[in-house]
Amino acid sequence: MFQSIAVRKAQGSQFIPDLRAAQPGGFRGKPVIAAQACATDCHACAEVCPSSAIALNASTADAVAIDLGRCVMCGDCAPVCPSQKLSFNNDVKLCATTRAGLVVTAARPNLDPVAVSAELKKRFGRSLKLRSVSAGGCNGCEMEVNAWSNVNFDIGRYGIDLVASPRHADGIVLTGVINRNMMNALQICWDAIPEPKLVIAVGACAISGGVFAQSEALAREFLDKYPPSLYVPGCPAHPLTFISGIMDVLGIAS
């Protein structure tokens, strides 16, 4: 008992009272692209990127663009840049409602704020039930999805819950690359959810295929048919990234 008390005292309160203001220390979040010019004929950052998230175009003012839908936040690009043009901060607010909205450049350092969807707010603003589907994930994002409901984040306080059956759900939380072995299971789950429904893509693998994007084992036609209402980048995606994004799109006040 005394040991439990000592642990509780050392850890303090794990509950996060204001999720919008929380900034996790040590978290590698949004890429920051400095204004200085790249070194001549340098492609070091793009060559080291494992997921082809970095696009270089020396003929434009924004010579470097980073796609957060592909970026796995490994940080390997920053130390190889001779111009010290790349770095990362601990910003967790990385969500977007469009695929193109996940690209950052020096001229566009901040993602567009997630706008409130009047339709989603009307239907799900007070109660949103989600079915988690791991369509070929490594269990990294899946563990973070499980953490949404723990004592730290407690998304249930906003009426958002993960449910066991798609028949009880309003939408899918999709993680993983969507491999061929999960293609039919994902479609069956989607078909079982009553209308209206939505897809939330969580993690680089779900959004783009991540480091496996070129694999022949993938079958990602599902996202062509059902574009996500919210993209949640990361590898894995931080719980605060999802929570800030879903609260914004549903218009939930803190």
Image (cartoon, rainbow, N blue to C red):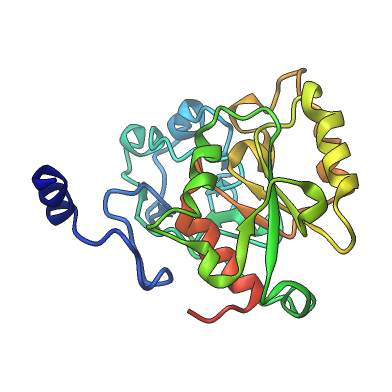
Q: Where is residue 211 in the image (x, y as percent from the top left)?
A: 59, 27
Name the one closer to the observer, 222 or 109.
222
State which quadrant residue 111 falls in.
bottom right
State which quadrant residue 123 falls in.
bottom right
Q: Position of residue 139 (x, y in %)?
A: 54, 31
Looking at the image, residue 180 lies above or below residue 235: above
Name the one closer to the observer, 183 or 82.
183
Q: In this view, does 40 lie to the left or right of 248?
A: left
Looking at the image, residue 29 lies above or below residue 126: above
* Residue visible at 69% across and 65% down in the picture: 128
* Residue visible at 43% across and 30% down in the picture: 44
* Residue visible at 16% across and 46% down in the picture: 4
Residue 52 visible: yes
Q: Where is residue 70 in the image (x, y as percent from the top left)?
A: 59, 40
Count of numbered badges drawn on the protein: 0
Looking at the image, residue 66 lies above or below residue 134: below
Q: Is residue 220 left or right of residue 68?
A: right
Name the one closer to the observer, 84 or 112.
112
Q: In this view, does 179 lie to the left or right of 65?
A: right
Residue 108 visible: no
* Residue visible at 39% across and 39% down in the picture: 39
Q: Residue furthest front?
A: 1
Q: Quadrant location of the N terminus?
A: top left
Q: Where is residue 34 in the image (x, y as percent from the top left)?
A: 38, 55
Q: In this view, does 76 lie to the left or right of 58?
A: left
Name the one closer to the observer, 181 or 218.
181
